[in-house]
Image (cartoon, helix red, strand yellow):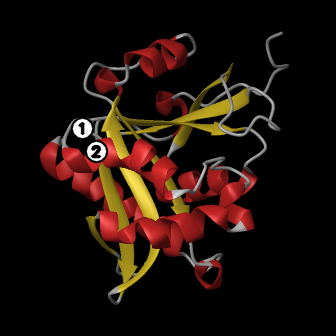
């Protein structure tokens, strides 16, 4: 696996972050505005310490190539309530959001390494924490990435999509030091989506 370093996002990264968010492969799933004002509104509270989400830039040999953030479900009660409709969310569980911003780094294993680095960071601080990640059912590349890193399908459910063009169908993945692989992790039953 590639070596990836994570460093905190800074406001000086906003121009780079905005460029990444405008690239078609990122914008498809991260439906964010990219004006300086919108970036400040979305990411500034974490940099100011008023939102506890941890924002990271992923580096390959010092070169920025991606973004990952992690946060506790406890700090996002509305999101926790939405996901808890389909899956028991432990009180200390985390979630992550991520993308590779540089198109030249796609499909080379950098996403796997970035997610592994984010998990290692979470588990250094919270060794027993589960990480639960809902992914739009149509986002096959992101789903396969999580599966390669060791996440297992735990549930399916109808959640609000990040991009309005997507349906509400999501696959919910989980991983954690205490979870066993396979059936104990809770493989999702591929059934008709609830209506």
Q: In this rendering, is residue 102 above or below 100?
A: below
Question: What residue would you read off at disc 2?
Answer: 46
Quarter of the figure that contains the N terminus: bottom left
Q: How many marks?
A: 2
Q: In this view, does 120 lie to the left or right of 83?
A: left
Say left or right for 97 vs 20: left
The percent coordinates of residue 15 (x first, y second) are 47, 71
- The mark that comes first in sequence, 1 or 2, is 2
- Residue drawn at (61%, 50%), measured in percent from left and top? 33
The answer to whether the residues at label 1 and label 2 have Cβ atoms under 8 Å apart is yes
Residue that label 1 marks: 52
Q: Position of residue 141 (x, y in %)?
A: 70, 58
Q: Which of 69 and 119 is in front in this view?
A: 69
Residue 153 vs residue 131, the one in the foreground = 131
Q: Quadrant of the C terminus?
A: top right
Distance between the alpha carbons at the discs numbered 1 and 2: 6 Å
Answer whether residue 25 is visible to the viewer in this image.
yes
Q: Dot 1 lies on which element?
A: loop
Name the element at disc 2: helix
* In the depicted structure, whether residue 161 falls above or below residue 74: below
> Badge 2 local density, few (<14 within 10 Å), some, or many (20+)?
some
Residue 54, position in %: x, y?
Answer: 28, 48
User: What residue is rendered at 65% in x and 23% in y?
Assistant: 159
Residue that appears at 54% across and 64% down: 18
Nearer mark to the viewer, of 1 and 2: 2
């Amino acid at each position: 696996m590639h070596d990836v370093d994570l460093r905190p996002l800074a406001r000086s990264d906003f121009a780079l972050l905005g460029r990444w968010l405008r690239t078609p492969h990122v914008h498809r799933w991260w439906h964010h505005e990219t004006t300086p004002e919108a970036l400040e509104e979305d990411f500034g509270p974490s940099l100011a310490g008023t939102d506890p989400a941890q924002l990271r830039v992923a580096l390959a040999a010092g070169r920025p190539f991606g973004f990952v953030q992690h946060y506790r479900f406890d700090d996002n009660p509305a999101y926790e309530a939405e996901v808890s409709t389909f899956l028991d969310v432990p009180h200390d569980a985390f979630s992550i959001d991520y993308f590779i911003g540089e198109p030249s780094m796609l499909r080379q294993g950098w996403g796997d390494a970035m997610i592994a680095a984010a998990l290692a960071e979470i588990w250094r601080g919270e060794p027993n924490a589960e990480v639960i990640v809902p992914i739009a059912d149509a986002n096959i590349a992101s789903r396969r990435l999580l599966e390669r890193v060791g996440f297992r399908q735990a549930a399916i459910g109808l959640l609000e999509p990040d991009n309005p063009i997507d349906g509400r169908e999501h696959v919910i993945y989980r991983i954690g030091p205490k979870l066993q692989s396979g059936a104990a992790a809770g493989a999702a039953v591929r059934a008709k989506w609830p209506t």
